Amino acid sequence: MREGRYYAFETAPHARGTVEISRSRYPAVLEDDRRVWLTAPGVLCVFAAYAVLAAGELRRADRGAARS
């Protein structure tokens, strides 16, 4: 928001850049922007869980190979 006007960044290929939007549209744009950023921690948690499980399976496999 600058000087009482509301702006958003347009990502369409034909109209890339900052565009002015209405005040009623501004909360919806903010909500959509936040929703995208909320997925990032979820994806990171999934990858971290995968890494922990994979490391545990590798450790278990190494122990099994050492006993043989």
Image: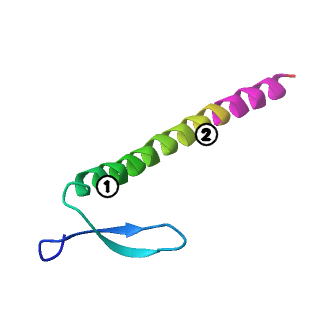
Residue 29 relative to residue 16: left or right: left
Figure quadrant of residue 13 = bottom right
Depth order, front residue of 25/40? 25
Q: How many neighbours does mark 2 have within 10 angstroms: few (below 14), some (14-19), or many (20 or more)?
A: few
Image coordinates of residue 48 in percent, x first then y, are 54, 41
In front of the other: label 2 or label 1? 1
Depth order, front residue of 21/67? 21
Depth order, front residue of 8/52? 8
**Considering only vertical position in the picture, is 18 above or below 60?**
below
Residue 38 relative to residue 50: left or right: left
Three-letter code for the amino acid on which mark 1 is drawn: Val
State the separation of the CA atoms marked 2 and 1. Answer: 34 Å
Q: Residue at x 51, y 43 (%)?
A: 43
Magenta stretch, main secondary structure, is: helix
The quadrant of the rendering that contains the N terminus is bottom left
Q: Name the residue under label 1.
A: 29
Q: Mark 2 points at which residue?
A: 51
Image coordinates of residue 3 in percent, x first then y, are 12, 77
What segment carries the magenta color? 55-67
